[in-house]
Amino acid sequence: MHTPAPYPRVRRKKESAVKIKTGALNIESSHFLAGWSPDVGTLFVPALSQSHVGDRVVVRIGLQGQPVYASICGEVSMARPVGSPSLPPGVKIQVDPASLPAVRYLAAVASGAPANFRVRSPRFLRERPVVVSVGGKRVRTHTLSVSEAGCAIAWPEAEFPESGEVASLRFGPWLLSPSIAAAVNWRSQEDATLGLSVIVKGRGGRAWREVVQEASRTLAGDV
């Protein structure tokens, strides 16, 4: 009796994870302004000098003498390693569109605007189930608010991840939903919440834009 050959197995192409490099620094206002090129949307920072062109980065930047900071997401367009003669090591970042308001905010404060002056993308109150992978843990929780640049989530664990730590988000069924790359921006143990900056790039970036659009349509509230 003839036995039909089995159907060949179709292997799904595994989506490559987005690797993110993170850093933090306090910088003098004059140096920040010298590194900011608003016409092309690039920012030079004296950090992450071991990065390579094309690397994804999240940098938490504060201005010396000012009570302000912002997390900037982007892609390295130029890297200057340690040891370059007469020039400081660091990277030039092509700033993501979602992070441009934060850079403009820092530039305004560095130019003398009041520190309470603030520019940011709209935030929408939205509770939506999400699985967060960070620090070797996979945590089921929900969002509290979302924006183009990131989100706030409830954090049910006793141990909190560190600021700058790389994370990923998945909405919907685990095996079917795309992984959205992110980094921890801030944490509040008192309120049991985390703030995450999202890397809006590739399939995960498209998925995140859909999350924000859905939240804006529900219009549960703007904070």
Image (cartoon, rainbow, N blue to C red):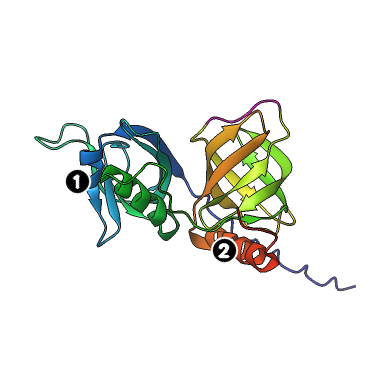
Quadrant (top left/top right/bottom left/bottom right) for the N terminus? bottom right
Which is more N-terminal, label 1 or label 2?
1
The secondary structure that dominates the magenta segment is loop
In the image, residue 78 lies at what x, y percent? Answer: 25, 49
**Front position among marks 2 and 1:** 1
Q: Residues within 10 Å of mark 1 (few under 14, many from 20)?
A: few
- Nearest the viewer among 94 and 119 is 119
Tell me which segment is drawn in magenta. 158-162
In the image, residue 90 lies at what x, y percent? Answer: 25, 39
Q: Residue at x 38, y 56 (%)?
A: 100
Q: CA distance from mark 2 to mark 1?
A: 32 Å
Task: Check the image and name the residue furthest to the left.
Answer: 86
- Nearest the viewer among 43 and 121 is 121
Mark 2 — residue? 209
Mark 1 — residue? 34
Task: Check the image and name the residue furthest to the right.
Answer: 1
In the image, residue 28 lies at what x, y percent? Answer: 25, 35
Q: Is residue 195 left or right of residue 137?
A: left
- Nearest the viewer among 68 and 139 is 68
Q: Is residue 180 above or below residue 140?
A: below
Q: Residue at x 40, y 50 (%)?
A: 102
What's the amino acid at mark 1?
A: Ala
In the image, residue 187 lies at what x, y percent? Answer: 58, 34
- Nearest the viewer among 147 and 220 is 220
What's the amino acid at mark 2?
A: Arg
